Amino acid sequence: MKLDQLWENGPIFRQSDAVFKIGTDVVKLAEFTNLSRVRRVLDLGCGTGVLGILLGHRCPELILDALDQNPQAVNLTRENAVRNGLSVSAHCLSVRNIRRFPQSFPAGTYDLIVSNPPYFSDGAGFRAKTEPIAAARAETDTTLFMWLEACSYLLRWGGRLSLCYRAERLSELFCAMTAVGIEPKRLKLLGTPPSIALVEGRRGGKTGLLINI
């Protein structure tokens, strides 16, 4: 069993070939995410659980939930949370089915949702060795709009969404966020030229975008 440590004395994670691997973009997103006035957090499309665990490492008082449609990802998230001394409630469910289980996922539950949604549209030419990896990287099961609709449903009024996405699809992302009632409020671009965008949105927020340099 191979364990990975992101930095000296930092959180430790086990990874699997059946679950999308930890990338720099997710670590940067955890650093970018604002935790002020946040108590309950959902890691949507949790993979190995890295986002929620990194936030829990920053603020141990958080109530952490996680969701992924890949059962192996959910098991890894639970295992990695225990390994790092955190309590994470992880659920196996597709984003498209969240509204069917209001007893487990009531509307307006979360102060913050963090997510690394699939970057590529279905048919964009992205290839993966396994179906679960493909679903984590491309919109084979859930479109960007469906993903954001679920976020809008789950966030409380004034709650925040923090995600990373392809910079080339920013126009799509911002239009879809606005359409579901999540106003883009903060942006940071990574890379030269920029390839990844870190974005914070607020449910019911007013217009006005801050660009972090």
Image (spheres, grey):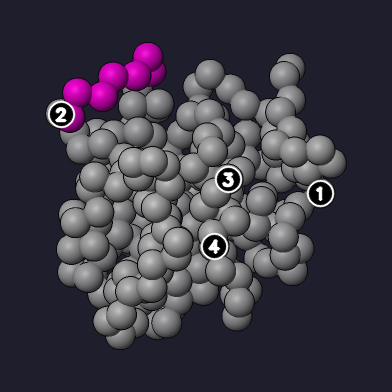
Residue in front for this viewpoint, 68 or 181: 181
Relative image position of residue 73 (x, y in whole percent): 54, 34
Residue position marked by numbered label 3 in the rendering: 27
Picture coordinates of residue 105, whole percent (x, y): 45, 64
Which of marks 1 and 3 precedes in the sequence? 3
Mark 2 or mark 1: which is in front?
A: 2
The amino acid type, in three-letter code, at marker 2 is Gly
Q: What stretch is highlighted in magenta?
A: 124-130
| Label 3 – label 1 distance at C-alpha | 19 Å
Helix, strand, or loop for circle 1?
loop
Instruction: Pick out the residue farthest to the right.
Output: 9
Front: mark 3 or 1: 3
In percent of the image, x 22 and y 70: which residue is there?
178
Q: Along the line of sight, which residue is nearer the eye, 134 or 95? A: 134
Q: Are discs 1 and 4 less than 8 Å apart at CB?
A: no
Please identify the quarter of the rendering in which residue 16 is found.
top right
Q: Is residue 25 above or below residue 108?
A: above
Separation of marks 4 and 2 at Cα, in angstroms: 31 Å
Query: Crowdedness of circle 3 by 10 Å Cα count: few (<14), some, many (20+)?
Result: some
Q: Earlier in the sequence, mark 1 or mark 4?
A: 4
Q: What residue type is labelled 1?
A: Gly
Residue at point 19%, 23% (across, down): 125
Q: In which quarter of the image is residue 128?
A: top left
In this orientation, which residue lies closer to the viewer: 100 or 131? 131
* Between discs 4 and 2, the one toward the N terminus: 4
Spatial distance from mark 2 to mark 1, Cα to Cα? 40 Å
User: What mark, if any, has residue 123 been given in the picture?
Assistant: 2
Q: How far apart are marks 1 and 4 (CA)?
A: 21 Å
- Residue carrying label 1: 85
